[in-house]
Image (cartoon, rainbow, N blue to C red):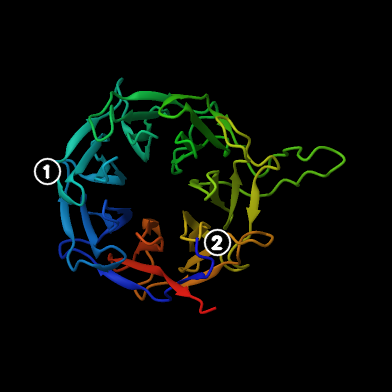
């Protein structure tokens, strides 16, 4: 990392437009093998995409249409993963409640037809709670909550290869709360770790016991209102925090330890792995850490996080004032910057469509969201180099 590099947000919003035939929703950013960012969004039950012309700069003028799985099957939710050879792959939940896939036939170029990966057995349908991860050996793996409340998984049988049958990963003893996103991260040794919200409002997780194979039982990370009794007497444990948790997102710090962020009550809480990191390693023994709202008058309604080019995690949050807010890790206590507003596009923000963060080839973050005009808007970081 170059200590003389200063990162700032550009301070303006630009529109990537929309296809002539539809408004867009729920954007998802991913990068190509050559580093170009590409955004995939839903419109009229189909997937539309637009990509950078070159890595780090410039966008195509027109949106492409990747269609819907069938004339009578439309897309409700989607994520985009990457194969080991860099080819992007779209995964979508259709209104038939099954999982569909569509992939690049070569790195950076060309797409297959839609193909179904079906549903789990026993007449279990899939919900919109799903995500995609990648094993240490580069095999993609999809996790989805079924209509039975269990998490189900399906994985590639080899890197860049075909797919297994569906396998049941189960659910926490407290059940899985159906309204929240599920999120998966990769540990420093490549083991995947999955997080959900339980029916008891706690965050629950399950992890691979070795890279690429085997899973633990479900374990609770508790809630901010729990008493964690750490540190032991005569020191005083942190008091419980009157916070709720929802829609968690996990990211990996530069040194490899995972950190989970969960908004609630207009702010967010976070909890992270303590080092050394191993299967079942300890998470912050004091329990959940609580961060403040952007201001007394502004609360968070949705949050995402990403690692910037300086190796610091940044959070980007939709505020109930209609703006996008940003905070990042810093070296001084309390180790997070104050919230700063990034404003809003002139069309304002359609908050129900959330946001997505992409990482440019040079490490700069770029955020995409939907305006109330149904177009995709974006703002991005710029690099400033000091003279001395």
Q: Is residue 252 above or below residue 97?
A: below
Residue occupying image coordinates x 28% and y 59%:
36
Please name the residue that numbered disc 1 is placed on: 71
Residue occupying image coordinates x 54% and y 70%:
340
Residue 161 falls left or right of residue 305: left
Residue 128 falls left or right of residue 202: left
Q: Is residue 366 above or below residue 105?
A: below
Checking the image for residue 119, the label placed there is: none
Judged from the image, the secondary structure of the residue bearing numbered disc 2 is strand
Judged from the image, the secondary structure of the residue bearing numbered disc 1 is loop
Please name the residue that numbered disc 2 is placed on: 328
| Outermost residue toward the front in this view | 388
**Image quarter (top left, top right, bottom left or bottom right) of the C terminus:** bottom right
* Viewer-nearest residue: 362 or 115: 362
Residue occupying image coordinates x 46% and y 33%:
191
Q: Position of residue 122 (x, y in %)?
A: 31, 20
């Amino acid at each position: 990392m170059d200590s003389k590099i200063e990162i700032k947000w550009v301070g303006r919003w630009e529109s990537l437009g929309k296809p002539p035939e539809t408004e867009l929703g729920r954007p998802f950013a991913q990068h190509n093998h050559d580093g170009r960012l590409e955004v995939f969004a839903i419109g009229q039950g189909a997937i539309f995409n637009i990509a950078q012309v070159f890595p780090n700069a410039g966008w195509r003028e027109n949106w492409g249409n990747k269609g819907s799985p069938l004339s009578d099957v439309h897309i409700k939710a989607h994520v985009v993963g990457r194969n080991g050879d860099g080819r992007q792959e779209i995964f979508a939940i259709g209104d038939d409640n099954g999982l569909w896939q569509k992939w690049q036939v070569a790195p950076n170029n060309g797409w297959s037809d839609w193909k179904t990966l079906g549903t789990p057995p026993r007449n279990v349908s899939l919900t919109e709670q799903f995500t995609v991860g990648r094993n240490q050996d580069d095999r993609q793996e999809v996790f989805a909550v079924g209509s039975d409340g269990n998490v189900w998984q399906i994985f590639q049988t080899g890197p860049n290869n075909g797919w297994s049958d569906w396998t049941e990963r189960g659910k926490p003893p407290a059940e899985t709360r159906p309204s929240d996103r599920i999120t998966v991260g990769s540990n420093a040794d490549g083991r995947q770790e999955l997080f959900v919200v339980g029916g008891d409002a706690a965050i629950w997780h399950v992890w691979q016991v070795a890279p690429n194979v085997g899973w633990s039982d479900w374990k609770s990370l508790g809630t901010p209102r729990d008493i964690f009794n750490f540190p032991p007497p005569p020191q005083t444990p942190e008091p419980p925090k009157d916070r709720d948790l929802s829609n968690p997102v996990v990211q990996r710090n530069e040194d490899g330890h995972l950190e989970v962020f969960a908004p609630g009550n207009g702010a967010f809480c976070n909890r992270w792995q303590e080092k050394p990191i191993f299967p079942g390693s300890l998470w912050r023994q004091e329990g959940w850490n609580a961060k403040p709202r952007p201001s007394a008058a502004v609360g968070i309604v949705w949050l995402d996080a990403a690692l910037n080019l300086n190796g610091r995690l940044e959070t980007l949050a939709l505020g109930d004032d209609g703006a996008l807010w940003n905070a990042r890790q810093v070296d001084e206590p309390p180790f997070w910057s104050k919230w700063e507003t990034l404003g809003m596009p002139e069309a304002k923000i359609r908050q129900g469509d959330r946001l997505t963060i992409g990482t440019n080839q040079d490490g700069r973050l770029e955020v995409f969201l939907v305006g109330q005009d149904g177009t995709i808007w974006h703002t991005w970081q710029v690099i400033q180099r000091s003279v001395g």
